[in-house]
Every structure is written in C-alpha cells, then in structure tokens.
Amino acid sequence: MKRFKLIFHIIYVVIALVIMYFSVDIMLNTEQYLSKIKLSSYIKFPRYVMGLFFFLSILMMIEYVMQQLRIRNIKGDIEDLKSEVTGLKAKLYDKSQANLDDISLDDADKGDEDED
C-alpha cells in the first residue's frame, strides 16, 4: 500500500505541474496557438478555461501539501501517545512489583509468626 501511495502521489504532483505549465503557456501564448489552429477566426478561444485549469492545479498542490502536513502532524501525535503509553506501562509495572514485594513481605511475616 505504501508503494501505491508513493506512486500515486508522484503522479498527482506531476499532473498538477503539467496542468499548471500548459495552462500558463497557453494563456501567455494564446495568439500563437490561435494562428496555428485552422478556422481560428471562427473559434473563440476560451481563456477562462485555462485560468480555471491553472487555479485548479494550484488548489491540487495546496491540497497535497496540506495533506502531507496533516499526515506528519498525526504521526507526531502517534509517537507522543506511544511514549505516554510506555510511561504508563512502566508505572503500572512498578506498582505491581511493589505490590508483589509487599505481599511477599506479609507472607514472610506470617511465616515468622507461625513458628512462634
């Protein structure tokens, strides 16, 4: 699953960059592209579409970065919780050892009283 995520994220970023590059290229060089298209006088080139593609590619990149930051934040929280659980386990173990020591001392005291 990790390999799939890695490949998917790479493809996602590449697609966003390609869309951004071609959107900006077409917006800046609209006249050159229109001169290469046949019937360019009859075709009205929708510049807003390229602007929309550019905007969406920026949103894709922002979404990807925010997702990676959230994942990193959650992983940090998991590590903090793991260390807290380990500390609580250590305290519980110490208490159980102290209780076992108390019980063994009580048994030894009872054994001494039985001998008298």
Image (cartoon, grey):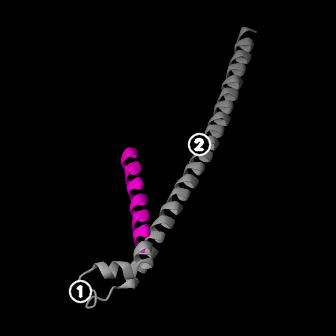
Quarter placement of the C terminus:
top right
Tell me the number on the disc at residue 102. Answer: none
Q: Residues within 10 Å of mark 2 (few under 14, many from 20)?
A: few
The type of residue carrying mark 2 is Lys
Q: Over which residues does the magenta segment extend?
A: 1-23
- Amino acid type assigned to the residue bearing label 1 in the image: Leu
Q: Which residue is under mark 2?
A: 82
Position above or below: 8 against 111: below
Q: Say which residue appears at 63% left-offset and 41% top-offset.
A: 83
Secondary structure of the residue carrying tag 1 is: loop
Q: Reply above or below: 69 against 80.
A: below
Identify the residue at image location x=40%, y=70%: 22
Answer left or right for 110 relative to 66.
Answer: right
Q: Is residue 86 magenta?
A: no
Left or right: 109 with respect to 49?
A: right
Residue labelled with disc 1: 39
First in residue order: circle 2 vs circle 1: 1
